[in-house]
Image (tube, rainbow, N blue to C red):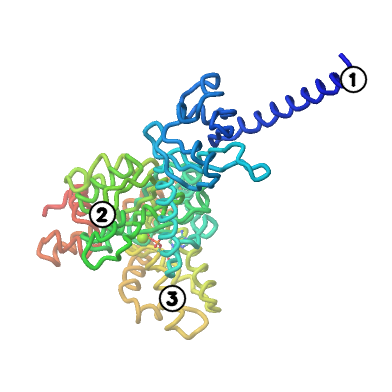
């Protein structure tokens, strides 16, 4: 071998190594690529293409491209030298999107490259749908909805040091870490909304949306489209483009189904299907849209009784109550009343103070409207009373019920300074007894007032009929 041969052999090896190197690069790409020479014979085909057409490399190299790849036009590109971009090509039953590019050297077509950009145009359709849905969401947000801003409350804002409330708060903090569904039970005004917001804010989904929907406030016939959205032209006069429902808007975040106990049975069935299958179908649209949503629901009804009365689906209840939080009413956490009063005064930037007698009256009231009602009373107090210290006679004028009920109990306690108030161990029992007897008296009064009409009595008492029936049974009331 002379020097020339050695150089040639070195160059050939070098060229060969370089070719191998480029082949490795092309094989590493996920897009199928084929290269043909000027006669449209395959000189290279990458792994992704071989996998796509299910052919071995040895069976493809050197063959005319038309024999290996269905509906190809690379042989025509070799003749015309014309680039073809984003063309549809049916390969193996799939509608692929391809580019065909001539390789031109010194004005001469020496070959062509075929590249598949989408193996199935349906993937593109999916992408387009996702984009469309994102656009719709964006449009919704831009229309002044507060969905994007995270809900206001965190666990730090939730006041309550009584043992019963602390227990609920601890459980809620724990539940926030998981993705389990949470069912918050409790009377009106106990802080169910607040807890739902705090759970979302402390959860891994806190960067996602928090969407709240009050199932009791929306007319039944609108609830379905509010929850699940509607498709194009689903209703006459509906927005032509359709609209996403709350579930779609909550994707990646939390949906808060407030007052779930008031959801009609037909909707309960639909909701159950959505929760089970994790996808929604808009009204008037058959397309299934997958959703990733954490569900928090709340109700002031006794759902278990509702299940017994066949007003609530048990299977839905199982889905909703991964974790149940029973928020105690304010009358069962009287120690929290001073904390809440002072917090409200601070929020109102009031410089007034509340006499200890008034505080006792507040602590002895039954608060059917719970914290919402307490806040309202404190607001009225600071607004109506102009003196620096709020005394009992002030509240007598604007909240006579509170005054009479509260002072009656205070007097009662003074008269019955019996051993039960001194004995710490028995205090809890006495408090419960007193709450129960107040509750029984209130129910009796409501029934008397309505001539034993339970529906009306339940309305006055602001409880559900089924709850009233349960309490009538509990207290052995003859009605
Ligand atoms: N533990 C709490 N600490 C501070 N404020 C509370 C607490 N619980 C409720 N509130 C306040 O009471 C009002 C009623 O609470 P909300 O969550 O709407 O009750 P619900 O949903 O149970 O009817 C709200 O103004 C809320 O800020
Ligand atoms: Mg609420």
Q: Which residue is at a point 49% across and 74% down the rendered structure image? A: 354
Question: Pointers 2 and 1 in contact (CB under 8 A)?
Answer: no
Q: Is residue 137 left or right of residue 234?
A: right
What residue appears at the point 27 percent right and 53 percent down from the top-left corner?
301
Q: Along the polypeptide, which appears first: circle 3 or circle 1?
A: 1
Could you tell me how far apart the alpha carbons at marks 3 and 1 are, in whole angstroms?
Answer: 103 Å
Q: Percent from the top left, x then y, of residue 32?
A: 53, 34
Q: Which mark is residue 283?
A: 2
Q: Residues within 10 Å of mark 2 (few under 14, many from 20)?
A: many
Q: Position of residue 386 (x, y in %)?
A: 47, 86
Nearest to the observer: residue 256 or residue 244: 244
Q: From the Cβ of disc 2, is ligand 2 less than 8 Å away?
A: no
Which residue position holds label 1?
3
Front one among 34 and 353: 34
Which badge, 2 or 3, is on the more N-terminal residue?
Answer: 2
| Residue 478 seen anywhere in this rendered image of the structure | yes
Q: What secondary structure is marked by label 1? A: helix
Image vertical order of residue 133 relative to residue 72, above or below:
below
Disc 2/disc 1 C-alpha distance (Å): 81 Å
Q: Quadrant of residue 122?
A: top left
Q: Which mark is residue 379?
A: 3
| Outermost top residue | 1
């Amino acid at each position: 071998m002379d020097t020339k041969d050695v150089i040639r052999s070195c160059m050939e090896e070098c060229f060969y190594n370089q070719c191998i190197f480029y082949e490795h690069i092309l094989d590493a790409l996920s897009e199928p690529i084929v290269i043909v020479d000027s006669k449209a014979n395959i000189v290279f085909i990458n792994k992704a293409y071989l996998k796509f057409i299910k052919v071995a490399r040895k069976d493809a190299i050197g063959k005319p491209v038309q024999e290996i790849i269905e509906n190809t036009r690379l042989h025509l590109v070799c003749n015309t030298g014309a680039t073809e971009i984003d063309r549809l090509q049916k390969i193996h039953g799939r509608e692929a999107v391809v580019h065909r590019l001539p390789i031109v050297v010194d004005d001469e077509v020496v070959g062509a490259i075929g590249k598949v950009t989408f193996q199935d145009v349906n993937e593109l359709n999916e992408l387009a749908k996702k984009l469309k849905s994102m656009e719709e969401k964006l449009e919704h947000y831009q229309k002044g909805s507060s969905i994007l801003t995270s809900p206001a409350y965190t666990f730090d804002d939730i006041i309550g040091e009584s043992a019963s409330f602390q227990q609920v708060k601890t459980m809620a903090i724990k539940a926030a870490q998981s993705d389990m569904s949470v069912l918050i039970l409790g009377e009106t005004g106990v802080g169910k909304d607040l807890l739902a917001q705090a759970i979302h804010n402390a959860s891994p989904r806190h960067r996602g949306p928090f969407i709240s929907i009050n199932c009791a406030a929306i007319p039944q016939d609108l609830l379905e489209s509010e929850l699940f959205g509607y498709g194009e032209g689903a209703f006459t006069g509906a927005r032509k483009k359709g609209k996403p429902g709350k579930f779609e808007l909550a994707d990646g975040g939390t949906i808060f189904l407030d007052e779930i106990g008031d959801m009609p049975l037909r909707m309960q069935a639909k909701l159950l299907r959505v929760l089970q299958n994790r996808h929604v179908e808009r009204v008037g649209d058959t397309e299934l849209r997958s959703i990733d949503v954490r569900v928090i629901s709340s109700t002031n009804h006794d759902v278990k009784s509702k299940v017994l009365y066949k007003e609530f689906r048990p299977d839905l209840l199982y889905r909703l109550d991964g974790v149940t939080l029973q928020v105690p009413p304010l009358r069962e956490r009287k120690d929290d009343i001073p904390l809440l009063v002072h917090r409200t005064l601070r929020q109102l930037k009031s410089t007034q103070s509340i006499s200890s007698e008034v505080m006792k009256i507040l602590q002895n009231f039954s608060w059917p409207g719970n914290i919402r009602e307490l806040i309202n009373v404190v607001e009225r107090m600071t607004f109506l009373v102009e003196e620096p210290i709020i005394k009992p006679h002030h509240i007598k004028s604007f909240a006579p019920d509170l005054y009479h009920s509260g002072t009656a109990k205070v007097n009662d306690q003074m008269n019955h300074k019996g051993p039960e108030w001194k004995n710490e161990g028995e205090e809890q029992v006495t408090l419960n007894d007193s709450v129960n007897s107040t509750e029984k008296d209130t129910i009796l009064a409501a029934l008397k007032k309505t001539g034993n009409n339970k529906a009306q009595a339940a309305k006055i008492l602001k409880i559900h009929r089924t709850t009233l029936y349960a309490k009538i049974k509990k207290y052995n009331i003859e009605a």
